[in-house]
Image (cartoon, rainbow, N blue to C red):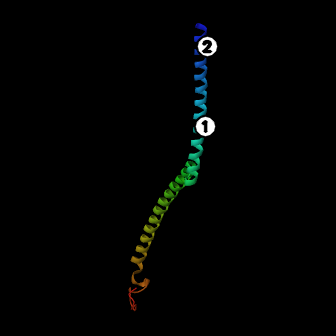
Amino acid sequence: MVQTTNRFFDEVARLMNDAAGVAQGVRREFDTLFRSQAERFLRDLDVVKREDFEAVKDMARLAREENEALKARVAALEAALATVGASAGATSGPARGGTAGAGDSTGI
């Protein structure tokens, strides 16, 4: 009887071991299937890749910085032009173009 009980437990242990192996195989198959379906779904949505997003984000940041620098440069040039125009207007007076609007019927 002892021999029979050991054999029974050996068979049960072997069955459980095989069942665990099958369960791991099913899990791997499910993971593979799920991953391929998710990739197909994302590809169909035309979602941008993270690397591409980061590259465009950096380009936008650089463009903003350049825009701010150009804005400051234009402001400085306009201030310099206003200073030059004011000093030229103060020294030359009405000789620059006469009186404003003289002979102009449109008002522009």
**Where does residue 93 sit, x and y in percent of width and height?**
39, 81
**Where does residue 62 sit, x and y in percent of width and height?**
52, 55
The image quadrant of residue 94 is bottom left
Instruction: In the rendered structure, find residue 84 and report the number of the disc placed on it.
Output: none
| Residue in the image at 56% along x and 50% along y | 41
**Where does residue 66 sit, x and y in percent of width and height?**
51, 58
**Chain-order first, disc 2 or disc 1:** 2
Residue type at tag 2: Arg
Residue linked to disc 2: 7
Image quarter (top left, top right, bottom left or bottom right) of the C terminus:
bottom left
Q: CA distance from mark 2 to mark 1?
A: 33 Å
Image quarter (top left, top right, bottom left or bottom right) of the N terminus:
top right
Q: Secondary structure at mark 2?
A: helix
Q: In the image shown, does 17 or 76 lie closer to the viewer? A: 17
Q: In the image shown, does 30 or 3 lie closer to the viewer? A: 3
Q: Is residue 3 left or right of residue 84?
A: right
Residue linked to disc 1: 29
Disc 2 crowd rating (10 Å Cα; few below 14, some 14-19, many 20+) is few
Q: How many marks?
A: 2
In this view, 93 is above or below 39: below
In this view, 73 is above or below 13: below
